[in-house]
Image (cartoon, helix red, strand yellow):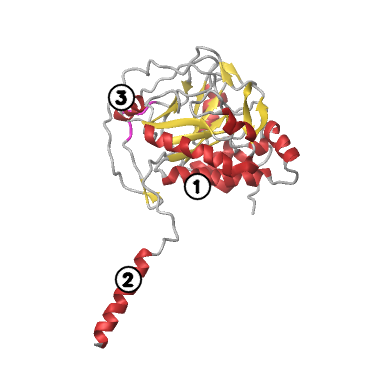
Amino acid sequence: MLSHRLFTVCIAIVMVLTTLPSTATNYPPRVLVPKHFTYANLAWGFNSGGKDTTTGQAIVLVDLDEYTANQIANLKSQGHIVQCYFSVGTAEPWRSDYVRSQWIGLALGNLPQFSDEYWLDLVQIDKIKTLMIPRFNRAKQLGCDAIEPDNTDCYANGECKNPLLKKHPGVNVKQLQIDYCKWQVDTAHRLGMSISLKNSLDIIPDLVDLYDFAVNEQCVQYNECNVYTAFVSRNKAVFNHEYALGSGTTYCDKSEAVGIQTKRCAGSPSAGLCNAGSTWLNCFDPLSPLPARNFTVGGTFGPTTFRPTTTKPTKSPTRQPTRRPTTRSPTRRPRTAYPTRSG
């Protein structure tokens, strides 16, 4: 009788233990983006449209509203990892999910180069999340392997920070941004998508272990590339963009010394835009064949679980982005020192 009772108790304990929630988040596998990967940018950076080739590029960046599920599937069938761009820090009235009555109450200052695009009030974070969750879900449904959320540096842009502080005196804008970024990472990872940190150099020490890779603009021009050793040393890719051709010594050598993959174009560094009709030029060689996909396993670098075809496209997609580019405010000032980790 005693042994029977002990057996019953043991079974009950096992059942309780197996039904208790885990203290660690078990994310589904997501694609890895290591530092040697190449990339094509078909999403932004150009004035009235530009060009890039996908041949030999492991990552292809597209806009969430400009590529269909079939087009994304086609890129993936050719061996590419597809990253989808959208803004998480501003309201973009031209997007398909924009309803003015839902967004206007969150409006702060306008982006200087886009009078109809405005920063969002990070104090109203719950309302912002409600609007962003469907956007994250749509990226997953379209087949995006990764996402590039833009405008994650409210604390560094006066058009966002100043009206936010005027509306909510005394709030810690930088901490609001960090908390929002952590939510973005968690949301993307729960959906099995990788996520990059866009610019936002001052909060890299707080977030580098959470993000999968990084996307930057003009780190050579602003002499900021060394900050990205935090990503590169963790074998996480950093994709940089410079809006002037310069020379190999000016842009390529300086970024390659840090382990950063850089594109450059004929453009305007002050405006942060390539000239209309210009083409991205790479500081890196195309990969042949394209690398097989590797996925995270338990939050660490894991074995290959899926190998796509490695056939490369014979030409870049004929459909080029026609909308205006959406980049960070060109009024951002270069950082002058490596940030001290907060908290």
- Which class describes the residues within 10 Å of circle 3: few (<14), some (14-19), or many (20+)? many
Residue type marked 3:
Lys
- Which class describes the residues within 10 Å of circle 1: few (<14), some (14-19), or many (20+)? some
Residue 101: image location, x then y, percent: 59, 30
**What is the magenta range?**
286-291
* Among the two numbered marks 1 and 2 on one chain, the one whose residue lies closer to the N terminus: 2
Residue type marked 1:
Leu
Q: In this rendering, which labeled residue sits more in front, label 2 or label 3?
A: 2
Q: In this rendering, which labeled residue sits more in front, label 3 or label 1?
A: 1
- Which class describes the residues within 10 Å of circle 2: few (<14), some (14-19), or many (20+)? few
Label 2, label 3: how far apart the Cα atoms are: 51 Å
* Among the two numbered marks 2 and 3 on one chain, the one whose residue lies closer to the N terminus: 2
Label 3, label 1: how far apart the Cα atoms are: 31 Å
Q: Confirm or deny contact between disc 3 and disc 1 (CB under 8 A).
A: no
Residue 2: image location, x then y, percent: 26, 87
Label 3 element class: loop
Residue 13: image location, x then y, percent: 34, 73
* Among the two numbered marks 3 and 1 on one chain, the one whose residue lies closer to the N terminus: 1
Residue 22 relative to residue 94: left or right: left
Label 1, label 2: how far apart the Cα atoms are: 33 Å
**Vertical side of 15 occupied by 156: above or below:** above
Residue 308 relative to residue 82: left or right: left
Residue 339 appearing in the image: no
Q: Is residue 290 magenta?
A: yes
Label 2 element class: helix
- Name the outermost residue toward the front: 101
Which residue is label 2 attached to?
A: 14
- Name the outermost residue toward the top: 277
Label 1 element class: loop
Which residue is label 3 attached to?
A: 312
